[in-house]
Amino acid sequence: MVSPLSSQASDEEDGAEENISLARAVLKHAPEEGFQDSDEGFWHSNWSPLRWFKMLVVELHWSFVFGVISVYGISQGMGGSISRVATDYYWKDVQSVQPSAAQVYHGITSIPWIVKPLWGLLTDVLPMAGYKRRPYFILSGLLGIVSMLTLSLHSKLHVMFALLAMTAGSASVAIADVTIDARVAQNSINHPSLAADMQSLCGSSVSIGRLLGYSISGLLVHAIGSQGALGLLSIPSVLVLLVGITLKEAHVPNFAYGQVFEKLNQASRSMWTTLQCPYVWRPCVYMYTSLALSLNIHEGMFYWYTDKISGPSFSQEAIGFIFSIASLGSLIAVVLYQNFLKDHPFRRLLFWAQLLSGIAGMCDLVLVLRLNLKFGLPDYFFAVIDESVSRMIIQLKWMPLLVLSSKLCPTGIEGTFFALLMSIDNSGLLTASWLGGLLLHLLKVTRTEFSNLWAAILIRNIMRLLPLALLFLVPNSDQNSTLLPADMLDTSDKMEVLEEVDDRKEDIEMASLVARTWN
């Protein structure tokens, strides 16, 4: 669970972590000579951001780079951050719903991210008109345009239709995310020496997009209202549509559509067999429980933040600026993890992250009880500290979970199985959102009544500590160890490659983590 203004790390915006396992899959199948690319030394010896970017355009084709920037940077990064702020104000000011209802609606809109394995399977085994990826970008763009314009142009849209439109918009981003993930994986296999560079391009696009989006989100809501801001999100969808039109992709005629069901059935059986392994289901139980018990009461805190009587009455600009400054907390977490924590055992690191998560949540209690004013700390200043610290701790908890998930993926179905694990995590976030909405409802926290908000915060913080009792389900090995038994890994002719590129594999995994978590 995040702090009052936090966008959950796993939330519909953050859905970009799946490429960690894809990078690992690339390395497992990469030919030995792939790491001896003569161009690599040239580019790195003459490295500069502009030259590096030109190199990617030349080596990978401009349409691929355009797709990464459009999907990760503009759609997920900038669009996701603007959507986060605009949606909160839309439920509060346009639909006039209670915070408990807004919390439940927020969980419903994340459902398309829970079924990401389905999108992944479809893009892998069901091409349309002879293309595997381009039609899904086009579908995603059209879906996003229609849903965002519907929210923007209908001032009296029924709440259920508004919820349907927002869920469709979330599905649009999720489908585009899965499809560009597949393109990244494919290009990584064809250009193994550029795998880390592609991860850096993806992560930097998301990072810059989020910082820009959060910086202007409050200004947009203030200038054109929440509906106007949501309407502008049709522009990222137009770019995704253009990606589908311009993407360079080989045409595959005469596809055997009769084999689609067989392939889907085979992949499903493989995933089910893997989930039955104790080495896999035990950590999965912990990950789901840990996220589900971190109750999400973000909407209750948001309503209090903007209340003119009980709360500090933050403006739209202040809300957006707090989000943008707090993004630095995630960056600090990445630096700490990369330099000091990546070699620690899973169990020890998750213990401290879970414990600190419960302690950091008390900052919300200090704000609601206005204790910060007694110490001479203004609400705005303390809110920035609260959000930054909470975001940093959430990121420190999320990163080892990502590494753990990537190490639970068996050979052959790495990408799809990692998407399944991320769906389990997103199910935990959905549960946390719905339980948080139920808690706000039971404590009668409404649009104007916040007398019991402190109790909701206290209960949430206590619930955050309960997963500590399940840490025995997490392997006590360090993060560089192999977790799956040998019979679930490919131990034949790829072993020599795995041994020789092991160090580089860890470097690419960390590069992926650093790049994709700057949000």
Image: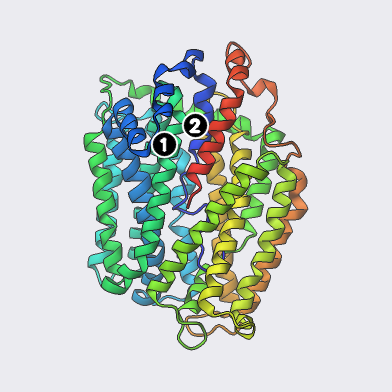
Q: Residue 310 in the image: x percent, y percent?
A: 52, 86
Where residue 210 sits, quadrant-wise, is bottom left
Which mark is on residue 181?
A: 1
In the picture shown, does residue 165 fall above or below 408?
A: below
In the picture shown, does residue 119 fall above or below 216?
A: above
What SS does tag 2 mark?
helix
Residue farthest toward the top in the current orientation of the protein: 493
In the picture shown, does residue 397 fall above or below 31?
A: below
Q: Residue 3 in the image: x percent, y percent?
A: 56, 66
Which mark is on residue 428?
A: none
Where residue 316 sits, quadrant-wise, is bottom left
Q: Say left or right for 171 vs 310.
A: left
Q: Residue 499 in the image: x percent, y percent?
A: 63, 18
Q: Residues within 10 Å of mark 1 (few under 14, many from 20)?
A: many
| Amino acid type indicated by mark 2 | Leu
| Amino acid type indicated by mark 1 | Asp
Residue at horizontal 43 percent and vertical 57 percent from the top:
109
The residue labelled by disc 2 is 22
Separation of disc 1 and disc 2 at Cα? 8 Å
**Residue 194 at least partly seen:** yes
What SS does tag 1 mark?
helix
In the picture shown, does residue 363 fall above or below 111?
A: below
Closest to the observer, 419 or 390: 390
**Residue 121 at least partly seen:** no
Q: Say left or right for 481 vs 268.
A: right
Residue at horizontal 63 percent and vertical 35 percent from the top:
275
- Mark 1 or mark 2, earlier in chain: 2
What is the number of callouts on the image? 2
